[in-house]
């Protein structure tokens, strides 16, 4: 018996005598080589993934006893080291993991490549005016089992997301994987122009000069340029493949970097803190509203789009970005709206962006702790869902909910 087997078995026994009752508990990161990529472990009910938990700074994954778990390595030509298959069934018995009758160790259950999701179009229309088409970032695990991670309501004519939907699992966010690098954004056929190019500062300066005959709005300095602003952010997810799955151009919109790295970043962090402190699973919708108009050299307001397709403009710069956070167990929710205009010059549909889109109640929301009046970082409004729905029709209808005012 190898030393690795002895150590691995000892670790399982030690953990099983800890805070878990029955089953097989393993160190999630133990014995993992550079070529090992964690598989996606399906929950027994088939409704989601098994996630590690954090115990004394160590990630632990728990397999239920007297039952099995499907492990999967989604992605083109991906497979498990164990048997070169895309998926396999692992059981737990007597604090040990088994593949059939063969006892196995966690390092044997790695994938040859990092699991990758699918992004597919569905026939379902979406949006208040049914102008969008529903897409989903999802994980086909095995026949009849498909885990949807992000729903994207996508306007195919303007090539932009209207809104996305996902969940934050506050029971496991403290155990999420943090990697040192980020993947490149994936375009897919939903975007017809060269998205990598239009998000460069050089291309944006040329565009602003063409549209506005002026470069005063976009200098590239002090974060005054348009970044790829995530709607559903990577840090809301636990597993590294889930985080990578947010890097589709369909999941980003042009957002001023000063806003992206300012109050929008603070909002994303605070929403995760709400989920983690409550130990709740939060439903989160994130969307855009309106097209940002900026004045040209003659003070005429011009719609901003990053690109031109065949006889149409695509990838609009949104005037507003919003996020609805809903705790279904406590039945409370809040909508947060940020203005995507760092200079305070903009308009949208003839309205000044300094006007409140709802009856603002940020002074009542205890976890909104940033400067909500700062335009350079993203002017912020806090709204009751039904009140905001009068202005932004794509906000979800949640019925009678309380205000999510405190953690």
Image (tube, grey):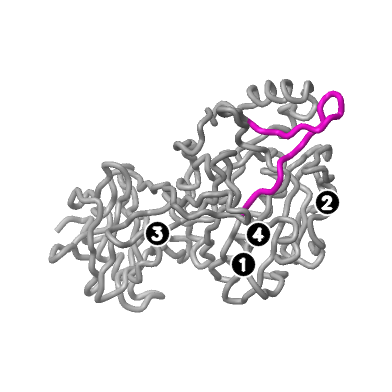
| CA–CA distance in space, label 1 to label 4 | 12 Å
User: x, y percentage for residue 61?
Assistant: 37, 64
Q: Give the structural element (helix, strand or loop) at label 1.
A: strand
Residue position for label 4: 395
Given residues 285 and 101, the one toward you in this image is 285
Label 1 Cα neighbours within 10 Å, binned few <14 / some 14-19 / many ≥20: many
Report if the CB atoms under discs 2 and 3 are less than 8 Å apart.
Answer: no
Q: Which mark is residue 147?
A: 3
Q: Give the structural element (helix, strand or loop) at label 4.
A: loop
| CA–CA distance in space, label 2 to label 3 | 39 Å
Q: Range of the magenta residues?
A: 286-306
| CA–CA distance in space, label 3 to label 1 | 21 Å
Position of 173 relative to 78 (above/below): below
- Precedes in sequence: disc 2 or disc 3: 3
Given residues 403 and 36, the one toward you in this image is 403
Q: Quadrant of residue 200?
A: top right
Q: Give the structural element (helix, strand or loop) at label 3.
A: strand
Label 4 Cα neighbours within 10 Å, binned few <14 / some 14-19 / many ≥20: many
- Specify whether 128 is left or right of 66: right
- Precedes in sequence: disc 3 or disc 1: 3
- Precedes in sequence: disc 2 or disc 1: 1
Report if the CB atoms under discs 1 and 4 are less than 8 Å apart.
Answer: no
User: x, y percentage for residue 403?
Assistant: 71, 71
**Residue at x-position 67% and y-position 40%:** 255
Q: Give the structural element (helix, strand or loop) at label 2.
A: loop
Report if the CB atoms under discs 3 and 4 are less than 8 Å apart.
Answer: no
| CA–CA distance in space, label 3 to label 4 | 24 Å
- Precedes in sequence: disc 4 or disc 2: 2
- Specify whether 52 is left or right of 170: left
| CA–CA distance in space, label 2 to label 1 | 24 Å
Residue position for label 1: 326
Residue position for label 2: 373
């Amino acid at each position: 018996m190898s030393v690795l087997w002895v150590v691995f078995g000892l670790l399982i026994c030690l953990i099983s005598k800890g805070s878990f009752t029955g089953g097989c508990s393993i160190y999630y990161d133990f014995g993992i080589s550079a070529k090992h990529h964690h598989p996606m472990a399906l929950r027994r009910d088939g409704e989601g993934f098994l996630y590690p938990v954090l115990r004394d700074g160590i990630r632990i994954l728990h397999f239920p006893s007297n039952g099995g778990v499907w492990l999967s390595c989604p992605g083109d030509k991906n497979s498990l080291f164990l048997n070169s298959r895309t998926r396999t069934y692992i059981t737990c018995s007597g604090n040990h993991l088994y593949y059939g009758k063969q006892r196995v160790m966690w390092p044997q259950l790695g994938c040859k490549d990092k699991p990758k999701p699918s992004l597919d179009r569905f026939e379902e229309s979406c949006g208040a005016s049914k102008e969008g088409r529903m897409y989903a970032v999802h994980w086909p695990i095995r026949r009849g089992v498909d885990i949807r991670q992000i729903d994207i309501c996508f306007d195919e004519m303007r090539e932009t997301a209207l809104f996305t939907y996902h969940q934050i699992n506050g029971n496991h966010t403290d155990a999420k994987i943090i990697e040192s690098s980020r993947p490149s954004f994936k375009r897919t056929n939903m975007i017809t122009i060269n998205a990598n190019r239009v998000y460069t500062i050089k291309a944006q300066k040329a565009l602003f000069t063409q549209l506005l005959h002026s470069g005063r709005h976009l200098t590239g300095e002090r974060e005054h340029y348009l970044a790829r602003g995530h709607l559903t952010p990577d840090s809301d997810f636990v597993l590294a493949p889930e985080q990578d799955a947010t890097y589709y151009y369909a999941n980003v919109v042009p957002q001023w970097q000063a806003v992206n790295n300012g109050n929008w970043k603070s909002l994303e962090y605070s929403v995760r803190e709400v989920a983690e402190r409550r130990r709740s699973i939060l439903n989160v919708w994130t969307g855009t509203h309106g097209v940002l108009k900026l004045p040209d050299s003659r003070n005429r307001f011009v719609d901003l789009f990053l690109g031109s397709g065949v006889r149409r403009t695509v990838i609009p710069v949104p005037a507003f970005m919003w996020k609805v956070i809903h705790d279904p167990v406590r039945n409370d929710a809040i909508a947060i709206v940020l203005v995507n205009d760092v200079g305070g010059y903009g308009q949208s549909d003839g309205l000044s962006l300094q006007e409140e889109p709802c009856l603002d109640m940020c002074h009542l929301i205890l976890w909104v702790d940033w400067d909500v009046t700062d335009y350079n970082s993203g002017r912020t409004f806090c709204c009751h869902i039904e009140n905001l729905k009068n202005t932004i029709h794509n906000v979800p209808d949640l019925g009678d909910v309380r205000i999510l005012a405190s953690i």
